Amino acid sequence: MPRFIDSLTGSDWFGYFARIVLTSMFWMSGLAKMLDFDAGVAEMAHFGLEPAPFFNAAVALTQLFGSAFIIANRLTWLGAGMLAVFTALTIPIAHAFWAMEEPMRTLEFYFVAEHVTVIGALMVVAWKSNHPETSNTVAAAA
């Protein structure tokens, strides 16, 4: 790997920024659910999650705490696990493409593929938080 890239990706600020970007979809959604609680409750009710106020609070707190753990690089494995499980649960609840008609079936399938990719990224975060010494080994193999 070029020295500049190694220096860039090895810096603390890069890791911090990367964790903020990775979790942005979660903490932005969590903040939105807390700042406009009624809209979040309506979203939960739309997907049949009752009591909707409880589910809105639980989802928002999961998104915010999971993101915070990853961004702070403390209990990172827990934050990644929380967000990965949450993301996996959204598939049958909000993106059940197999029960839809076209063109929504294909669109929702792509959402599911993106969700699976995000789950994979969260798995890498959990793995790296437990094995930080493997970064040079992985980079050398690439």
Image (cartoon, rainbow, N blue to C red):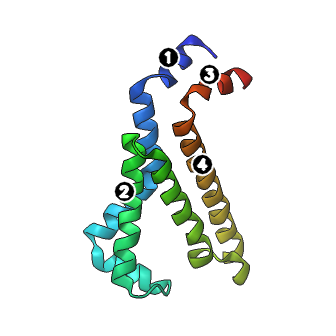
Q: Which residue in the protein does label 1 denote?
A: 7
* Callout 4 secondary element: helix
Residue shown at the point (71%, 70%) measured from the top left: 106
Residue shown at the point (63%, 57%) measured from the top left: 114
State the mark number for residue 123.
4
Q: Earlier in the sequence, mark 4 or mark 2?
A: 2
Amino acid of disc 2: Phe
- Residue 18, percent across and down? 46, 38
Q: Earlier in the sequence, mark 4 or mark 1?
A: 1
Task: State the residue in front, 31 or 82.
Answer: 82
Q: Earlier in the sequence, mark 2 or mark 1?
A: 1
Q: Residue furthest left?
A: 35
Q: Which residue in the protein does label 2 denote?
A: 65
Judge from the rendering whether residue 108 lies leftward or rightward of residue 31; answer left or right.
right
Q: Residue furthest top?
A: 3
Q: Earlier in the sequence, mark 4 or mark 3?
A: 4
Question: In this rendering, does residue 103 appear at all?
Answer: no
Q: CA distance from mark 2 to mark 1?
A: 30 Å
Task: State the residue in front, 49 or 110.
Answer: 49
